[in-house]
Amino acid sequence: MAHLLIEENFRHLDGEDVGDLIEGLSGLGLRAEPTQPRTSPGRHTWVLVLHWLRDDVTPITDDSLVASVVDAVRGVLLKEHPAGPGGTRVQERTLPARIDIRGRSGELIRSVAVPGAV
């Protein structure tokens, strides 16, 4: 069973990005899967939303794990891949301003700024 769901955001992520995020989180011992958007996107600020699926939220509130999640996201989204035919068609492929981690009921568990976001 997955630990996390990654909200898809086709304005900022493409399929390759989501696949790389799943792989990066797997390297942290977290099983992740994509999901359709469940929250309303911000009008001016992009927020990557992850949904924690476990009852015990203690692991995802651990500072070192959260820092590793931020590093994994930065590593994926700072990696260049071609735009246009054969590459990404994402209009605004940038780092999110922050990562929100929500619980099973949608409650905010943790919100963390992403260094280097514009």
Image: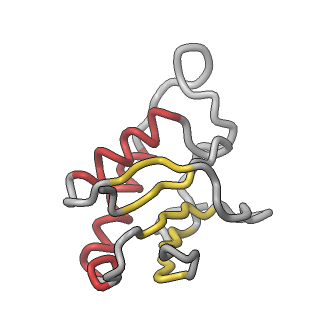
Q: Residue at x 60, y 14 (%)?
A: 85
How many numbered circles are shown?
0
Q: Residue at x 36, y 79 (%)?
A: 55
Specify the color scheme.
secondary structure
In this view, 26 is above or below 117: above
Q: Quadrant of residue 31?
A: bottom left
Quadrant occupied by the N terminus: bottom left
Q: Residue at x 31, y 82 (%)?
A: 56
Q: Nearer the viewer, residue 99 or 77?
A: 99
- Image position, residue 109 (x, y; %): 47, 83
Q: Nearer the viewer, residue 105 or 8?
A: 105
- Image position, residue 32 (x, y; %): 36, 53
Q: Nearer the viewer, residue 115 or 72?
A: 72
Quadrant occupied by the C terminus: bottom right
Q: Nearer the viewer, residue 100 or 52?
A: 52
In the picture, measured across the screen, residue 79 lies left or right of residue 100, that is: left
- Image position, residue 87 (x, y; %): 53, 22
Q: Residue furthest right?
A: 43
Q: Residue at x 33, y 57 (%)?
A: 2
Q: Residue furthest top?
A: 85
Q: Quadrant of residue 13?
A: top right
- Image position, residue 38 (x, y; %): 64, 60
In the picture, measured across the screen, residue 14 lies left or right of residue 59, that is: right
